């Protein structure tokens, strides 16, 4: 799958549900409405689409949400996708989770062929964790992380940089990750979602956010690449592998290899664009040839780059779509 700018698209992120048991301040409003169940793709529909995506060249899939592990009977989908890993059709199956149900699901994820997962965690302070996530329990998340490691999975912590909210949490998080053999990726907050307030106040560039770490340690560039957009550094002599995702301060669109399937069957070619194609109608009309045609149309719609900087500066240009519906 080659888009109009010559980028090879081999990575699909699937939002299996827009629901979440957290209400992280940078993701969605505290009072959030969700799609009715009838609008969600069924597991059978997701699996049909996955087969078409694989046929078109997708080799890596990440399950996202919302929180993927809160969807009922999610084990059915995970086990079925794992078969594509075991037979070699997929190179990688991964997941991003808030960790709240990870302790229970860790054995299933490992048996499905997941070698690594991402856990969203913005601080190691229990009260701050509860405040930022609006209800998350730190001890439960940590138990999930340790369970995943015990079942042989690599864990990367995703930490969103929030000005004056978790800047003091960076050094403790870096030390924790280094101690437990976890990667750490820092992410700049993005202007997505109606009703998510204080965007300008909470945004901080990672160059500024990482200043305390750079003052104490040497950051050495690495050639390591994951399927996502992070640039990696070795924090010496701490021994930590640090990823930086900088959609606002250092654009990385020229390397983009991703498309996103939403909970209701839409393909978004860019997190920062409303351009999409709707696969659900064609799928439910049982016209797979139309699905194939729409996939090719989607490739032509993929923009050269996002416009997050402009959207952050001008509130009327921000997208109403929340991260939990698109799958980050």
Image (tube, helix red, strand yellow):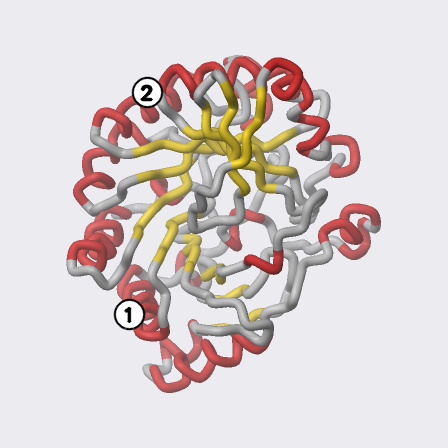
> Which image quarter: residue 96?
top left
- Mark 1 packing: few (<14 Cα in 10 Å), some, or many (20+)? some
Residue at the (34%, 41%) spot, across then down: 69
x and y percentages locating residue 216 in the rendered image: 61, 13
Is 273 or 306 nearer to us in this picture? Answer: 306
Counting residues from the start of the chain, the first of labels 2 and 1 encountered is 1
- With 44 as the anchor, is 124 left or right in this view? right
> Which image quarter: residue 270?
bottom right
Q: CA distance from mark 2 to mark 1?
A: 34 Å
Is there a contact, CB below 8 Å, between mark 2 and mark 1? no
- Mark 2 packing: few (<14 Cα in 10 Å), some, or many (20+)? some
Q: Is residue 282 above or below residue 120?
A: below
Say which mark, if any, is on residue 143. 2
Residue at the (22%, 59%) spot, across then down: 84
> Which image quarter: residue 300?
bottom right
- With 270 as the anchor, is 101 left or right in this view? left
Q: Secondary structure at mark 2?
A: helix
Label 1: which residue?
51
x and y percentages locating residue 107 in the rendered image: 19, 34
Is 172 or 126 nearer to us in this picture? Answer: 172
């Amino acid at each position: 799958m080659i888009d109009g700018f010559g980028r090879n698209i081999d990575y699909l992120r699937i939002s299996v549900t827009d629901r979440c048991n957290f209400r992280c301040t940078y993701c969605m409003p505290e009072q959030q409405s969700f799609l009715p169940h009838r609008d969600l793709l069924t597991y059978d529909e997701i699996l049909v689409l996955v087969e078409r995506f694989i046929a078109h060249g997708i080799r890596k899939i990440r399950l996202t949400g919302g929180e993927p592990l809160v969807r009922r009977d999610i084990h059915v989908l995970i086990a079925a996708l794992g078969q594509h890993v075991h037979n070699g059709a997929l190179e990688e199956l991964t997941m991003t989770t808030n960790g709240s149900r990870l302790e229970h699901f860790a054995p299933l994820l490992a048996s499905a062929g997941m070698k690594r997962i991402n856990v969203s965690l913005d601080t190691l302070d229990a009260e701050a964790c509860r405040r930022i996530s609006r209800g998350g329990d730190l001890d439960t998340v940590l138990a999930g992380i340790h369970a995943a490691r015990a079942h042989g999975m690599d864990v990367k912590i995703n930490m969103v940089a929030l000005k004056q909210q978790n800047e003091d949490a960076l050094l403790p998080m870096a030390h924790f990750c280094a101690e437990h053999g976890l990667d750490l990726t820092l992410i700049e907050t993005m202007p997505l979602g109606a009703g998510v307030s204080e965007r300008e106040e909470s945004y901080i560039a990672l160059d500024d956010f990482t200043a305390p770490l750079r003052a104490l340690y040497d950051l050495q560039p690495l050639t390591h690449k994951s399927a996502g957009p992070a640039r990696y550094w070795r924090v010496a002599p701490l021994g930590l592998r640090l990823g930086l995702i900088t959609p606002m301060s250092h654009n990385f669109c020229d390397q983009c290899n991703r498309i996103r399937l939403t909970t209701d069957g839409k393909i978004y070619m860019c997190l920062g664009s409303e351009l999409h194609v709707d696969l659900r109608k064609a799928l439910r009309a049982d016209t797979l040839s139309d699905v194939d045609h729409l996939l090719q149309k989607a490739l032509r719609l993929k923009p050269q780059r996002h416009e997050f900087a402009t959207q952050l500066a001008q509130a009327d240009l921000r997208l109403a779509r929340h991260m939990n519906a698109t799958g980050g």
